[in-house]
Image: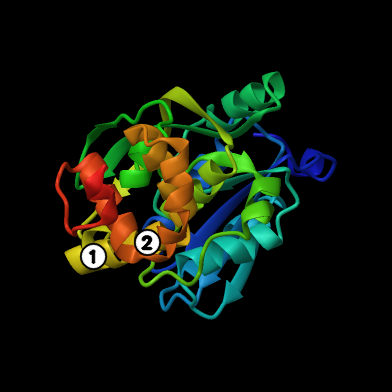
Amino acid sequence: MVSQLNNNFMSTKLSIIIPCYNSESTLETTLKSVLNQEFQEWEAIMVNDGSPDNLEAIALKYVEKDTRFTYFKKENGGLGSARNYGIKKAKGEFILPLDSDNQVTENFAIDAMSIFDKDQNIGVVYGNAEFYGEKTGLWKVDEFSLDKMLVHNYIDACAIFKKSLWQKVGGYDENMPYQGHEDWEFWVSLAELKVKFYYLDKITFKYYVSSTSMSKSFTDEVILLNQDYIVKKHSRLFYDHYCQVLDYPAVLKRNYSNKLKSKKVIVDLFCKTFFKFSLFKTEFDNF
């Protein structure tokens, strides 16, 4: 670990954003993983999102230990709100959202920075994860696929991206029906900008699984309402992509572009393309 004195003369290239809520039992291992990184040009911004536990004591201990840690406390606003709050204060060119129960691997940041340096067109670097807690094993993802991303989110928020992209899309959406899918909507927003994603085929972080994990609270209603919100918000992207996948003629695409306002048409295309069934009878069925 570099000395406290040397930290004061380091530039900040990577800002690690750590939203905290009810994570007193896991926060310290998260912060230790940040300290143990090979890459050193970082800052870590902890955002206490109105947590009722005593995580503040742990956070302040690390602020005292290393000046690259900073700590803020705000009223509860949800995960997207906490991430946006931290990113607004970030000094780095690159952002790494890190949940306060997950752990970043030692070489993820240094590998990602090398990738960004080699190809300026890359906007996001992401990788695989290792489960720990109540589940163990490898969470192996895959190369970026818009087909897959439009159906479900398979890339965790724990990825490194350019802060300028966050600014272009207006940050994480804080208006979704339920919190928990902000990262999915964010990736879809970047895909709409044709951002280049780079898949690093190695373990880049450890993902904590417990009975109290946010993902465990997702009911069918939560998932469907958030899916519906994303499809409607990005209806142009869904429509254009489905036309390409289904190979509709350009003239047909023009004739039915006004149908984007119809929730039925968008949802029906979604279901027909990826699940092979139709919910509604639409004018597309005549072709």
Q: Residues within 10 Å of mark 1 (few under 14, many from 20)?
A: few
Position of 65 with respect to 154 (left or right) is: right
What is the x, y in percent for residue 166? 63, 52
Q: Of 116 and 35, which appears nearest the observer?
A: 116
Are discs 1 and 2 less than 8 Å apart at CB? yes
Position of 132 with respect to 9 (left or right) is: left
Residue at (28% x, 39% y) in the render: 131
Position of 30 with respect to 242 (left or right) is: right
What is the x, y in percent for residue 113? 65, 28
Q: Amino acid at mark 1?
A: Ser
Disc sitting over residue 187 in the figure: none
Q: Of 195 and 285, which appears nearest the observer?
A: 285
The answer to whether 284 is drawn above or below residue 3 in the figure is below
What is the x, y in percent for residue 207? 35, 43
Can residue 26 be seen here? The reply is yes
The answer to whether 224 is drawn above or below residue 148 in the figure is below
Q: Secondary structure at mark 1?
A: helix
Residue at (42% x, 65% y) in the render: 261
Quarter of the image with the N terminus is: top right
- Residue named by callout 1: 217
What is the x, y in percent for residue 78? 45, 71
Q: Quadrant of residue 45?
A: bottom right
Q: Quadrant of residue 181?
A: bottom left
Colour convention of the picture: rainbow
Q: Amino acid at mark 2?
A: Gly
N-terminal-most mark, 1 or 2: 2
Can residue 57 be seen here? The reply is no
Quarter of the image with the C terminus is: top left
- Residue named by callout 2: 180
Q: Secondary structure at mark 2?
A: loop
Mark 1 to mark 2: distance in Å?
A: 9 Å
